[in-house]
Amino acid sequence: MATITDVSKRAGVSRSTVSRVVADNGYVSEEKRQAILEAIAELGYRPNTMARGLRSNRSDIIGGVVVNVSSPFYAQMVGGTQMACRAAGKSLLVTSGHAEVEAESRAIIELLDRACDGLILYLENPIQGDVLEIVRKSGVPVVTIGGDDCPVARARITIDNFTGAREAMRHLLALGHRRIAHLSGGLIYRDSRERLRGIEAALGEYGMGLSDIRVEYGEFEERFGFAGIETLLSSGEDFTAIFAGDDDIAAGALLALKRHGKRVPEDVSLIGFDDNFHARHLTPALTTVRQPVGEAGQLAANLLLQLLAGEKLEHTEIIVPTLLVLRESVTSPRLLEAVKERA
Amino acid sequence: MATITDVSKRAGVSRSTVSRVVADNGYVSEEKRQAILEAIAELGYRPNTMARGLRSNRSDIIGGVVVNVSSPFYAQMVGGTQMACRAAGKSLLVTSGHAEVEAESRAIIELLDRACDGLILYLENPIQGDVLEIVRKSGVPVVTIGGDDCPVARARITIDNFTGAREAMRHLLALGHRRIAHLSGGLIYRDSRERLRGIEAALGEYGMGLSDIRVEYGEFEERFGFAGIETLLSSGEDFTAIFAGDDDIAAGALLALKRHGKRVPEDVSLIGFDDNFHARHLTPALTTVRQPVGEAGQLAANLLLQLLAGEKLEHTEIIVPTLLVLRESVTSPRLLEAVKERA
DNA sequence: TACGTTTCTGGGATCGATCTCACACAGGGA
DNA sequence: TCCCTGTGTGAGATCGATCCCAGAAACGTA
């Protein structure tokens, strides 16, 4: 592996001059620059990342810690970030915490040890206090995307769960639904809380409150969707619409509804959240709230790149809008009654 | 940030001794070891990765280059690798090539420049010749997973596309299907070629050949599934079963079949490949061939870890078995005819 | 006592870049 | 002529660890 000294010898200059050419700063005569570039090409010289990092304490690595890379949701987010980083000539070093706070902490510290220039956190749980302190001391700029507030974050990307849920709920209410159940993700997740707030806001517009609908809590998993519907149906109450906390829950709910002979949307309307890969492929195709995950990932990267470029963003927040995607799983109960009466 | 010198001063020893304790090699008296460990804890010392890497030319980073992290398929694979690496105390630095050979090449070089200890390649396209040479010269051990043969790979993980496709085809043939169409991924992909070989093998067992079924080629995308069915139906030929190159293609095919009023599986049976997230959620639930993606990712990591531990695996290949998952999208044409006749 | 061997420790070179500083020279203005 | 600014170049310190080597101390054996 050729070193800077090899290049300097070959080009008949000092290492300093080579360094100036490589870093493209300082004065270098055109003549020597050409000679050096030639030598670099001939030797196939590529600067040693470690040596550079040791001296300058930069690595051109951006670190990312994500709850779980295996999940399509986060994979897409990371993919968006990756693209934006690559375009800016930075590498993205992603580590997955597998939903364990302890592992997430270790991942953060490990990334800092790699002298990463910046950190993007795709986490749901708050960071442990001692780790927070280490991050603060390191001075590395942090951008969070989703999840809870993070005191060391210089900027954050938030997906507008509030408005998304409000729009979805408004949609159901506007169509005439009143007996509605919500299968919510756990309240430990900020996302769930925001969505509930949105739901409450929409209900308020119709003179109703959260107590006027039925809410069940569980994990963001298909299993819970299935179990939640079982619970609701066995309670004997009757619903015209289900608002699932996300599309996985909706998929489980759909399965359970079908199993109980309930047709969607003829008997029950169903609405989800996320617009993940299979929302479109369910039968009926799921009406849901799209989260622009890839774009959010890109925005996070761009914010961090701005911070790295020295821009003074303190406590910046970008709120990414959601989009209500209308498909086949929701209909109006009034319409159905009219059809029934005519028959 | 505390350095090894700070620790040595605090513990009243030389840097060498501290280094011996940290690396846990060489002789150190128990007394000094304790003093050093104490100093490390008090100062919150963590070794500088760059300095260590510069001197020793190791980084404890394993590099991964993947076609596209955003895709759930690869995300799961990478997730598996990630877990195995973490368990072994290595970081996984993943870069996505976004399906461009040029970007993949750059990613590989970049990882080598980061002095990664080993490389895992999740690629579909062969590596460019000059990059191959750089990899070879670097001496970094390489493990590939899927994709084409790679001359510099010391070990490879192959998912058994041949057997998977053969089993799937056998299943259709055993049920009595004879008028079958295959919507294949492009022949540039080794996976497609292997699956075709499997299909041919199964046909052979029934005294048939590839020429006895209809094969259409396209991308591994839903779009192609839809378009492929359109082509088939407009050709006027009649099929009792469709073997889709993967589940995305199957999803598109299903959509097109429904649009043309064909019921699955009553009119046409449909089988996919992958068992991805939405296979189970299609209506009817898709019969398909499961690829154990996460496990394959783990196995790749384990192979690489063995290589790093100095084991002599030269041209090792692990073939990961697939599993035919029976769901609702396939039925027997004979059975259907019998039912029809009785009616 | 003399000697080897094992245990223990520190000095100092080294990895490959960056970066400050000193210095040389050219050209322009006072 | 002198000084100043801008341009161009190289020497050498520096980043923080690793690791070879020399040598001291402890211990056993002939």
Image: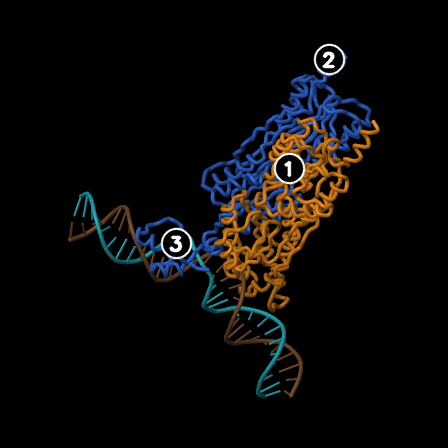
Chain colours: A blue, B orange, C cyan, D brown
Image location of residue A191, percent across then percent down:
64, 33
Q: Nearer the viewer, residue C14 or B276?
A: B276
For the residues labelled 2 and 1, the Cα–Cα distance comes to: 39 Å
Label 1 with label 3: CB-CB less than 8 Å = no
The chain under label 1 reads B
Image location of residue A32, percent across then percent down:
32, 54
The residue that mark 3 highlights is A19
The chain under label 2 reads A
Q: Nearer the viewer, residue C30 or B187?
A: B187
Amino acid on which the number 3 mark rests in the picture: Ser
Horizontal relation, residue B212 to residue A49: left or right: right
For the residues labelled 1 and 3, the Cα–Cα distance comes to: 50 Å
Whether residue A221 is visible to the viewer of this picture, yes or no, is: no
Which of the numbered marks, if any, corresponds to residue A338?
A: 2
Which of the numbered marks, if any, corresponds to residue B248?
A: 1
Q: Nearer the viewer, residue B242 or B138?
A: B242
Q: Secondary structure at mark 1?
A: helix
Q: Are marks 1 and 3 on the same chain?
A: no
